Amino acid sequence: MLYPLRKKLRCYNDMIFCSYVKAQESLIYSYNRSINGFAAKLEEEEADKLAKNPNVVSVFLNRRRELHTTNSWEYLGLESSQGVVNSGFTWVEAKYAEDTIIASLDTGVWPKSRSFSVEGVGSVPSKWRGQFQFGDHDSKKSLRNRMREA
């Protein structure tokens, strides 16, 4: 049985690369929660080849963006800082999201990430104050220990 990452690398290899090692070296990140996709360092010819694959929705150049929640609407081009929607703004161009699928940007934390491991961490300090929200599969102790450092 192939592990998930290995399976994905094989798939990417089959689509654009000539070797499994090249696929592994090119891969930057693999997305599998809300969408299936990946970020990779590709040559222009490799990106063109991938874009022509009928199983691929889109291929685009990655651009660094910095989100600022105080002016997200303006940042996204939805409206001006005064709340005005002018022609040329994203809302107008996208016909106010008619026939549009909008992706979710989840900037939260994943409690089971190794970053929140309780290994080597003592108990919660007595002076610490806060609340926890528990999921169906989280024990109160494990979530408390994982999330207190977040």
Image (cartoon, helix red, strand yellow):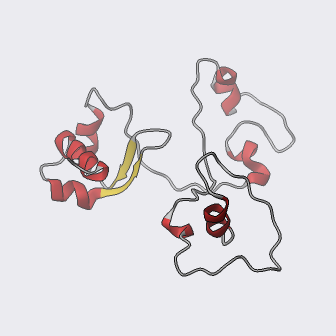
**Coordinates of residue 147 in the picture (x, y in percent):** 66, 65
**Residue pictured at 83% horizontal, 70% vertical:** 129
Q: Quadrant of residue 82?
A: top right
In which quadrant is the C terminus drawn? bottom right
Left or right of residue 16: residue 141? right
Q: Is residue 88 visible?
A: no
Position of residue 19 measured from the top left corner of the image (x, y, whole percent): 13, 53
On the image, the x and y values in percent for residue 140 come to: 67, 59
Across and down, in percent, residue 105 comes to: 60, 45
Q: Residue at x 30, y 48 (%)?
A: 4
Q: Is residue 16 visible?
A: yes
Which residue is rendered at x = 59% and y = 31% of the image? 102
Relative to 149, is 23 above or below? above
Residue at image location 39% in from the left, 34% down from the top: 58
Answer with left or right where residue 133 lies relative to residue 13.
right
* Residue 90 picture quarter: top right
Pick out the residue farthest to the top. 99
Looking at this rendering, what residue extends furthest in the left direction?
18
